[in-house]
């Protein structure tokens, strides 16, 4: 059984196409999960709404606690890290992470940034040793073969690599950097554009994104079945 972790980061609570002023990224992430459940109905789904219930931002106390060795932490440190521990536990449980992350001012929403800051944990998701030869840090999730798909939405257009606005896109590049640092080697991105225009180009972009999602679900589900047969 595969465990899928479904994350939504949009401040908009609804889905486009269903709810007035609904979120495109929520629409895309919901479609991925629904298609995945059709292909693999026995899999486990975890859900966290980072848009409506964002994690607490990292504080000075959090940093003090996180960089204190577990065996020497005081009780208040465990309390400060409790939410972060729960988020890391979910990430470790998940084989596949589906993240609906809209572009806000060229970057990720605040709730998703808080999520990132809570899951990048020394001793849990990355290692650090000043005396280590070469780089003092290393990813701890590399051998877990986790997959991440980032489903985004953008008001303008041309944010893909090589296009007119690519240099201002700090969503997928940021996420790839962070999760790559933790050991994710399979990160895929699909995005909707033209939201600010709201014309036929938006409709076409939504249709294209949904087709890409359906194809990715089929490919990844088939790949998992082949891995099970080979095992």
Image: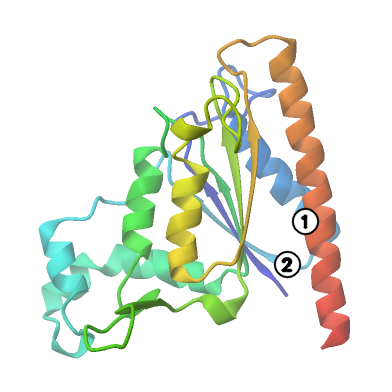
Query: In the image, 36: left or right of 179?
Result: right
**Quadrant in the rendering for residue 2:** bottom right
Q: Position of residue 60 (x, y in %)?
A: 11, 59
Relative vertical location of residue 130 with respect to residue 86 in this rendering, above or below: below
What colouring method underlies this structural image? rainbow
Q: Above or below — where is 43 with respect to 154?
A: below
Task: Count neighbours of disc 1 (C-alpha within 10 A) and say few if under 14, some if 14 to 19, many if 20 or more.
Answer: some
N-terminal of the pair, mark 2 or mark 1, is 1
Residue 145: x %, y % from top left = 62, 74
Q: CA distance from mark 2 to mark 1?
A: 7 Å
Position of 174 with respect to 221 (left or right) is left
Image quarter hosting the N terminus: bottom right
Q: Residue at x 37, y 43 (%)?
A: 111
Question: Disc 1 marks which residue?
Answer: 37
In the image, 79: left or right of 28? Answer: left
Q: Can you tell which mark lies on residue 104?
A: none
Q: Residue at x 55, y 27 (%)?
A: 154
Q: Residues within 10 Å of mark 2 (few under 14, many from 20)?
A: few
Helix, strand or loop under label 2: loop
Locate residue 89: give its quadrant. Answer: bottom left
Whether residue 54 is visible to the viewer of this picture, yes or no, is no
Give the image location of residue 49, x and y in percent: 47, 46
Q: Which residue is mark 2?
A: 43
């Amino acid at each position: 059984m595969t465990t899928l972790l479904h994350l939504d980061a949009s401040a908009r609570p609804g889905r486009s196409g269903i709810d007035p002023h609904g979120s495109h990224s929520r629409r895309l992430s919901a479609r991925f999960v629904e298609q995945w459940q059709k292909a693999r109905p026995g899999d486990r789904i975890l859900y966290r709404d980072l848009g409506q219930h964002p994690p607490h931002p990292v504080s000075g106390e959090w940093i003090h606690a996180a960089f204190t060795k577990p065996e020497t932490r005081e009780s208040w440190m465990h309390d400060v890290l409790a939410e972060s521990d729960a988020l890391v536990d979910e990430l470790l449980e998940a084989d596949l992470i589906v993240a609906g992350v809209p572009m806000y001012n060229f970057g990720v929403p605040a709730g998703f940034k808080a999520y990132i800051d809570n899951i990048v944990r020394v001793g849990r998701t990355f290692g650090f040793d000043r005396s280590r030869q070469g780089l003092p840090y290393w990813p701890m999730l590399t051998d877990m073969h986790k997959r991440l798909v980032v489903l985004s939405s953008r008001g303008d257009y041309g944010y893909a690599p090589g296009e007119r606005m690519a240099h201002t896109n700090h969503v997928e590049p940021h996420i790839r950097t962070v999760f790559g640092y933790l050991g994710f080697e399979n990160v895929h991105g699909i995005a909707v554009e033209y939201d600010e225009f709201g014309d036929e180009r938006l409709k076409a972009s939504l249709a294209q994104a949904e087709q890409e999602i359906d194809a990715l679900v089929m490919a990844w589900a088939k790949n998992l079945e082949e891995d099970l047969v080979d095992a």
